[in-house]
Image (spheres, rainbow, N blue to C red):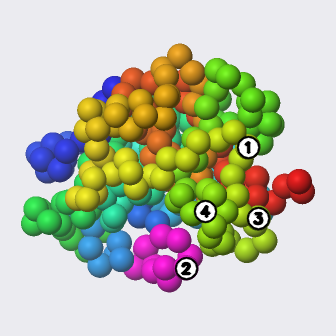
Amino acid sequence: MKVLVSTKWLNNNLNRKNLVILDASWYMPSENRDCYQEFLKIHIPGSQYIDIDNLSDKSNELPHMLPKLEKFEIFSRICGINNNSIIVIYDSFGIFSSPRIWWMYKYFGFNKVYILNGGLKKWKEEKRLVTKKIIKKEEGNFQAKINHKYLSKKQDIIKNIYNKNCKIIDARSKNRFYGKEKEPRKNLKSGKIPNSINLPWKKLISENGMLKSNIQLNNIFNKLNIKKKEKIISTCGSGITACIITLSLTKLKFDKLSVYDGSWAEWGMRNK
């Protein structure tokens, strides 16, 4: 399934009327970087900035959980998104945080949404046009329709831990998964969800920041004995990199896919 567009395609379509480009760059709090200030200094022409932390449910104690439908619609309309738009999302690393926003649009019923393969990193390496000019879009008419299959909650995890037809795949690093390294967020236990599988998200991304080829991805998932007939729930630290697993499997035409939005930020607080 097509989930990516190339830098060449985006460059050739920059002036397309129904195209909306979103910069979804995001960093861990420990990195002490300001995504928005970086966006103001340099971005792909016509881009709208998206703040993953702001576009979330602020009433929830967990970080950047899915926002309410109305909030997502309002944000999308401000960005100039209509139901017939084509959305291309990128981030500064290559592919890191952009799949989170891609997944959110899938959850809210929008299908023509794609990731820029290689992101801003590849775009700059190819010396393509960048700007600091902000273009305010005409307000769109986007209407969301929730597709519940894309979301898993804590009770879904509990229900499926020992389900032979379901696999829970964790995108965190090996050391975090096996509890050998402290979690970056406070008040969280170390370890893993019982019966889950570890697939560090970096294994899915090539050195140049692009998603690996179908052959490479198939080899990775085959080694983990992941099958298309199974239900796959992706998880990570706080629901960001889990979406890279979902993106990769979507590319390979898997369709029983969801993301555990609370991820370890929620599960690691459980009193067990």
Check if mark 3's residue and mark 2's residue have beta carbons within 8 Å.
no
Which badge, 4 or 1, comes first in the chain's sequence? 4
Q: Which of 93 and 65 is in front in this view?
A: 93
Residue 89 shows up from this direction: no
Residue 244 higher or lower than 252, as above or below: below
Which badge, 3 or 2, comes first in the chain's sequence? 2
Residue 129 higher or lower than 184, as above or below: above
Give the residue number, with chain letter if any, for mark 1.
194
The residue furthest bottom is 32
Q: In this image, 181 relative to 12: left or right? A: right
Give the residue number, with chain letter if any, for mark 4.
176
- Of the two numbered discs 2 and 4 in the rendering, the one whose residue sits closer to the viewer: 4
Check if mark 2's residue and mark 4's residue have beta carbons within 8 Å.
no
Instruction: Decide: few, some or many residues near mark 1? Use Cα within 10 Å; few <14, some 14-19, many ≥20.
Output: few
* Figure quadrant of the C terminus: bottom right
Q: Give the residue type that dot 2 points to.
A: Ser
Give the residue number, with chain letter if any, for mark 3.
189
Q: Is mark 1 on a helix, strand or loop?
A: loop
Q: Distance between the residues labelled 3 and 4?
A: 10 Å
In reply to whether residue 30 is colored magenta, the answer given is: yes
Instruction: Decide: few, some or many residues near mark 4? Use Cα within 10 Å; few <14, some 14-19, many ≥20.
Output: many
Residue at coordinates 53% horizontally, 71% vertically from top-left? Answer: 28
Q: Residue 30 carries which label?
A: 2
Which badge, 1 or 2, comes first in the chain's sequence? 2
Q: Which of 97 and 180 is in front in this view?
A: 180
Residue 143, image x, y percentages: 54, 34
Quadrant housing residue 213: top left
